[in-house]
Image (cartoon, rainbow, N blue to C red):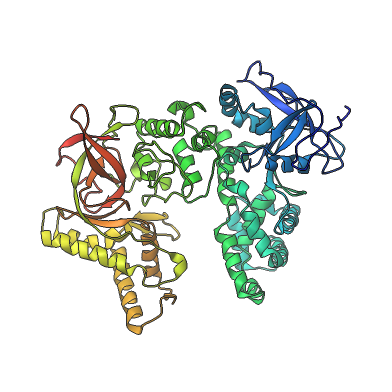
Amino acid sequence: METPSINLDSSGKTSQNCGLFSYKKLKSPKSQIRLLTLHPSNEYARPIDCSIQDADIDKPTPYKALSYCWGKGDKSHSVSIDKAALDITESLDSAMRHMRHQNEPIIVWIDQICINQSDDNEKNDQVEMMTRIYSKAEQVLVWLGPADQGSDDAMDLYAEVGDTICKTGLQYYCNRDMFSLVDAAVHRKDPGDQLWQKVSEVQSLTRELLLPCLQAMVDWDRRYWFTRVWVVQEFCVGVDPWFICGHKRIPVDYVKTTRLFLGIGETPEFLAAVRKLGEDKLPLLQALNNQDPTPAFFSARTWRQKYDRGESPGDTLLELLRKTYVSRGANATEKKDRIFSLLGISNDADRLGIHIDYKRTEAQVLTDAAKVMIEKGNLAVLSYVQFPRDVGGLPSWAPDWRSNLRPSFYPYQEVSLEDEHYFKPSGDRSPAVLPGFDNTAIGLGGFVVDTVEDVGSIWKDDSSAKDPLRHQSFLCQIRFLCRLSAAKNQPIYASRQRRDEAEWRVPIADIWEANEPGSGARQRATGRAMKALAEFRHQLAWFECVGLVRSAVAPDNREPSMYRLSMSKMSGMRPFVTYWGYVGIGSPGMCPGDVLVILFGARVCSILRPTGMGANMAKRYVYIGEAYCDGVMDGELLGRRWEEVFYLV
């Protein structure tokens, strides 16, 4: 095919005398896609020339699918499609120039071009097909961006180490079931062990290559692609995904296996070598370990592959939302896509009845998603209502699912079966969900525990501060509230001993971080937590007596450190006491006069704020947040309070 003569002006726009590209309607937008043929060029700066054709999604011409970031919304560049110009973003222009071949055309699917972005009806149909589009592609090309900040060095490291792992056969050990054998070999260091010989070879190579490019590796981890919401689905379902950065390409599994071996390569000798490069290099090594974005992607991909093989139940929409937005910087250009981008890989989208519809507002999409999940009995949705939100018009009970939401103190991610739950404040009662006054209201059955009388200050656990006294004010506040409760002498506990236990149960929400072999990651607190807090208090008193500076590092006493770890999940919350003397920890937005309630089917308490009566004389409430309340989490009040419906607005 003859390449048309097209000139590129300084802005990246095609300047040939050709018309603007106009989309032809797909005959069947629910089963057809457009495929783009990217014609070759041996010059990077040469204008991008393409042609486009329709294809049946079930019998397509072999094609690749591009996973990338749109970048800035303005379409400052253009491509030629069948001799007509179509505007595209700068990011896509760069991606297409880097991935086109010098001699051969490639057939590729690119959402920005292959979907008519100005046709909402087509967009709805095509976006619902995204899972099929990426799973049908023979290869998914993950565009991380142009070469910059030493990215070539990082890509070379992944390529060389990943290739060595494959050649030694170690890739077969790079999974949850087999990697323990590698750990055991590293521990033994038996010179006659063939596995150790292979691991040692990879370790040596990894350390050698890593030392000079620590900064480059950290910068690679911070590529914007890892924060984009849609790429989760694209990465999970792709058959053969490859990372492309600049002109370098590597299979994504090279990154997965290399990162596993990076984790076991930090010997004392290696740390000493890092220090020789300068103390400023140690934070880079820490960032490489603690800010690695790839495990979440590989975990989701593995989980999805098992689901496709019938080996796992897969993820619900709520589980995917939690994995994507809680403690992660995931972003979407359109806030509707916070929901839409995950529907294709959730195992309950059909049951929930959520459909992609870009004609609906952001608030409508987020509200509808919250409502249908709650109506199906999943009140855990409420734990992710956190203020301030970045979407206007949302009812108080609907999460906005913005990035970096605070994790719930309750470990929802660890429980699936009913008998695995730590708390049952409403016993075995199922959620009672009733229609609200309108689409922005919802009614939930439950009962009032008490009214909040006083609240403490918000506690934030800044672990990076290394301040051994940072927990003291929080513990002192809780001790004061517990003593205030005791002075009220209300019969809210079965015994005086149980009342006294509140002082060590409340700071950790009665959940102990076990973190040791043979036990779950978390468990209900026992007398061990009481002893740990006592040791911790002695430790804090010692720090004060000797007058250590606040930057001092606390001695490594296991029990106090476990108690501190158990406290960390309460960061961002505040202690409270009710009029009857119930003590707990709740949402940072709570204040005196708020109502502490237990909703049927919920695993935690809720804080509500009365707002007056509705048109039918029913009380209305604003949802403030979740809470732990000592003495009510095991159903102690069930049958002892009036049941009512709380209408949340």
Spot occupied by residue 526 in the image (x, y as percentages of width and height): 29, 60
Image side of residue 120 versus residue 39, left or right = left
Residue at 39% from the left image edge and 36% from the top image edge: 393
What residue lies at 15% left-to-right and 53% top-to-bottom? 579
Name the residue furthest top.
27
- Which residue extends farthest right? 2
**Residue 17 left/right relative to 264:** right
Q: Is residue 77 above or below residue 118?
A: below
Of residues 296 and 388, the one nearer the viewer is 388
Instruction: Name the one closer to the observer, 274 or 304.
Output: 274
**Picture quadrant where residue 23 is located:** top right
Q: Is residue 306 visible?
A: yes
Most foreground residue, 236 or 46: 46
Figure check: 199 above or below 124: below
Q: Residue at x 56, y 22 (%)?
A: 121
Percent of width and height locating residue 213: 70, 64
- Judge whether 201 appears above or below 537 on screen: above
Is residue 196 visible in the rendered structure shown here? no
Q: Is residue 108 left or right of residue 285?
A: right
* Closer to us: 533 or 478: 478
Horizontal placement of 42 versus 630: left or right? right
Q: Quadrant of the N terminus?
A: top right
Q: Quadrant of residue 391?
A: top left
Q: Quadrant of the C terminus?
A: top left
Question: Count of labels shown?
Answer: 0
Corner quadrant of residue 209:
bottom right
